[in-house]
Image (cartoon, rainbow, N blue to C red):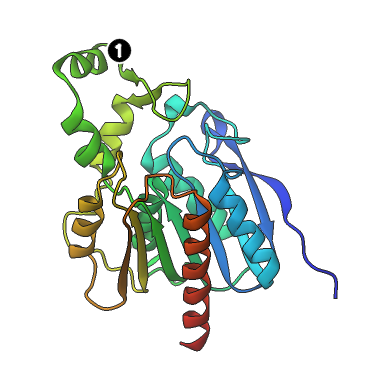
Amino acid sequence: MRQAIEVESILTVGTGADARPIARSVREGAAPTLLWLGGYRSDMRGTKAERLADLAAREGLGFCRFDYSGHGASGGRFEEGTISRWLEETLCVVESLRAGPLLVVGSSMGAWIALRLVQRLRGTPAGRPVAGLVLLAPAPDFTERLVRPRLTADARARLERDGVLREPSRYGDEPDLYTAALLEDGAANLVMEGTIETGCPVHIVQGMEDPDVPFSHALELVTHLPADGVTVTLVKDGDHRLSRPTDLALIERIVLAEVAALRQA
């Protein structure tokens, strides 16, 4: 039997002046389909996404990854990006899939998008069910809980004056970029305000040496999730990227365990 391969395509999201081409890559296979949701300023060709693609191919699982607008191979300007905009693109990608239940793996901001995704899909008859969530260094509500509190008076003044803030990045030469629109929209998409009814098991993987998203943030997230079906794995020396060989092997084992549990349910 010939092994299915990933097929790259373009999905247009939005209409008129708001239309933007979203690059996606889909591999058909057995359920559950793995859906990769990357982080802020990352793309679908990153280390963790590639490892997940290899895992899906080896295990014969369905797999989907894509770039948000302003990221990677997708169109649109990064400065126009917001949580609502990237969530809209995620919903369109999910609706375009022909696969069955989804196991969503969200990294950093992708975990926030994943939680908003389940909120939007729950109770929608036509919505494709999310059967499980694996959240890596989850950063839900990061605009309000992590970015705003760290802004200096000078940074706040520049953001108000220019509508955009550029700060040095620890991950490359390009600066971190935050817009007033992103922060305002983030405040309208907060999830850590009450109980987050996911309707599915959740497994959180968090590094305890994460300089960007402290592990206390992941533990607080747990308090907003239903008591049943939530697992937390702390990596004592893990950073935000969770991309070392040992981290990747751990993520792979967790995803396989979640796949097995979903198949037995």
Depth check: give the residue in front, 9 or 32: 32
Relative image position of residue 152 (x, y in whole percent): 17, 20
Residue 115 at least partly seen:
yes
In the image, taking residue 245 as reference, residue 194 lies left or right, namely left
Residue, disc 1 = 162
Question: Hey, which residue is sitting farthest right in the picture?
Answer: 1
- Secondary structure at badge 1 equals helix
Q: Residue at x 18, y 57 (%)?
A: 220
Depth check: give the residue in front, 261 or 179: 261
Depth check: give the residue in front, 204 or 184: 204
> Splitting the image into 4 quarters, where does residue 158 fall?
top left
> Splitting the image into 4 quarters, where does residue 225 fall?
bottom left
Relative image position of residue 9 (x, y in whole percent): 71, 47
In the image, taking residue 35 as reference, residue 123 lies left or right, namely left
In the image, taking residue 158 as reference, residue 71 lies left or right, namely right
Q: Residue at x 24, y 33 (%)?
A: 147
Kind of residue indicated by mark 1? Asp
Relative image position of residue 47 (x, y in whole percent): 57, 47
Position of the N terminus by quadrant: bottom right
In the image, taking residue 42 as reference, residue 133 lies left or right, namely left
